[in-house]
Image (tube, rainbow, N blue to C red):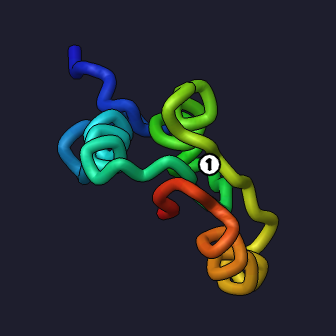
Amino acid sequence: MMANSGTANPGMANSGPRGADIIGVLKAARVEFVAAVPDIVTSAGLLWPISRDPALHLIRLCKEDEASRSAPAARSAADGRFC
């Protein structure tokens, strides 16, 4: 039996970085705000854990062009580090 990789497809445990590893790197870089376009691949292992983490603030965006317009404004308004 394979260990759960923290991804939406636990059967692909060795196919890429784990959500917990990515969150660890974000915290090590002192990132406080994360803007993301939610999708099924990243939601289970990455975005849901970020949304529950009190040290990180998840900003959900509707579509990619919204992200490209919103990110610069959010970065300038945030006191903390933005990813």
Front residue of this view, candidates 24 and 75: 75
Local crowd size for mark 1, using a 10 Å CA cut-off: few (<14), some (14–19), many (≥20): few
Q: Is residue 74 left or right of residue 24?
A: right
Q: Quadrant of the N terminus?
A: top left
Secondary structure at numbered mark 1: helix
Q: Is residue 6 above or below residue 16?
A: above
Q: Determine the residue located farthest toward the front in the rendered image.
A: 79
What's the residue at 66%, 84% (across, down)?
68
Q: Position of residue 52 (x, y in %)?
A: 60, 25
In which quarter of the view is residue 54 placed?
A: top right
Q: To which residue does mark 1 refer?
A: 40
Q: Position of residue 83 (x, y in %)?
A: 48, 63
Residue 78 seen? yes
What's the residue at 58%, 57% (across, down)?
79
Q: Position of residue 39 (x, y in %)?
A: 64, 55
Residue 18 seen? no
Front residue of this view, candidates 51 and 81: 81
Q: Is residue 69 above or below residue 20?
A: below
Q: Is residue 57 left or right of residue 22?
A: right
Front residue of this view, candidates 15 and 53: 53
Q: Is residue 4 left or right of residue 50?
A: left
What's the residue type where badge 1 is placed? Answer: Ile
Front residue of this view, candidates 51 and 12: 51
Count the numbered circles shown.
1
Q: Position of residue 59 (x, y in %)?
A: 70, 53
